[in-house]
Image (spheres, rainbow, N blue to C red):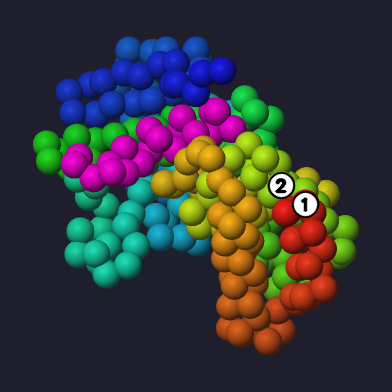
Amino acid sequence: MSNQIKHNIKFENIRFYFDDNLFLNNDFDFYMEFFDRTKILKSKDTKLSDGRGKTLIFKHHGLDLVLRHYKRGGIFGKIIEDHFFKFECYAHRARDEFNLLLQMRQLGLKVPKPIIAREVDYGLYLKQDIVIEALNGFKDLSKIIAQRPLTDFEYKLIGQMLKSFFDNNVLHTDLNIRNILLFENEVYLIDFDKCVIKSIDFTCKQKMIDRLQRSFKKEKLKNDKVYFSEYGFEILKQYALV
C-alpha cells in the first residue's frame, strides 16, 4: 500500500501536491485559486473558522472545502509565525499531512479527503497551506458539549473511532475535543499536522487519551455550563483502549 502523492507540479518557487486527475492542469492560476484568500473571502459563502491558521471554509469548483495555513504555536510562533526552515525535522508540514491523510483513507479511517497542498519556497524556509474536503453537518466536540451532554452511545462511538486509529498505529500529537467531529453517529478525526504512523504501545495510547481528557476538563473549567461526564469518558476509554 503506497501513501505517496501521485502528482505534484512546480511553478518557479511554488510546488503543488494533489492526488486526483481532476487537477492535472498546466495553468498556474488554476492551482492558485485554491489558495487566494483575498478572493475566497469576497464570496458570501465563505466562513472564517477558529484556529491558529485562520481557517477558511469555502466553495470552489463545486466542492465544499477547507483552507488551512500552517502557523507556528507558542512563543517561537509569535516571532516567525509561518516560516518553516528546511533543516527542521517537520519542515514539509503540508506535504506530510497530505500524504498521511491519503494513507489513512486507504486504511479506511475516518479522516477528511485531502484535495491539494502548497509549498512556497523562500530559499531557507517554506510557507505552506493545505486544502481538504469540508465535512458538512459535523461539529467538533467543544461546540456540542457547550449545548448538550454527549450520550453514552456517543462516548462509545468516539472510543471505537479512536481504537481504529490506535490499531493502525496512528500517533496523533494533539488529540483534543476540537479535533474530533461528530454528526449523526459518525465520528471523524482531523488536524494531523506533525502526526505519523509508527509503532505505538499501550502507554502511548494512554497518553493520547489523557490529553483528550484534559481538553474536556479544560473546557469545563473555562465555562461551568459545559457538559462533561466522567462516567461517559470512562466508556470512551473502555472502547478506545480495549
The answer to whether residue 136 of the structure is visible from this angle is no
Q: Is residue 134 left or right of residue 144?
A: left
Image quadrant containing the N terminus: top right
The amino acid marked with disc number 2 is Lys
Q: Is residue 214 left or right of residue 15?
A: right
Label disc, if present, on residue 242 of the rendered structure = 1
- Quarter holding residue 75: bottom left
Task: Tell me where the magenta segment starts and ends, as one range.
Answer: 86-104
Q: Main secondary structure of the magenta part?
A: helix
Mark 1 → mark 2, Cα distance in angstroms = 8 Å
Residue at 46% x, 60% y is 51
Q: Position of residue 46 (x, y in %)?
A: 52, 48
The amino acid marked with disc number 1 is Val
Label disc, if present, on residue 163 of the rendered structure = 2
Residue 179, above or below 6: below
Q: Are discs 1 and 2 less than 8 Å apart at CB?
A: yes
Residue 162, above or below 36: below
- Quarter holding residue 225: bottom right
Report the mark closest to the observer, 1 or 2.
Answer: 1
Label disc, if present, on residue 196 of the rendered structure = none
The answer to whether residue 115 of the structure is visible from this angle is yes
Viewer-side residue, 152 vs 56: 152
Q: Earlier in the sequence, mark 1 or mark 2?
A: 2
Residue 27, above or below 198: above
Q: Position of residue 213 (x, y in %)?
A: 64, 69
Q: Position of residue 44 (x, y in %)?
A: 52, 49
Residue at 73% x, 53% y is 240
Residue 61 among those drawn in magenta: no
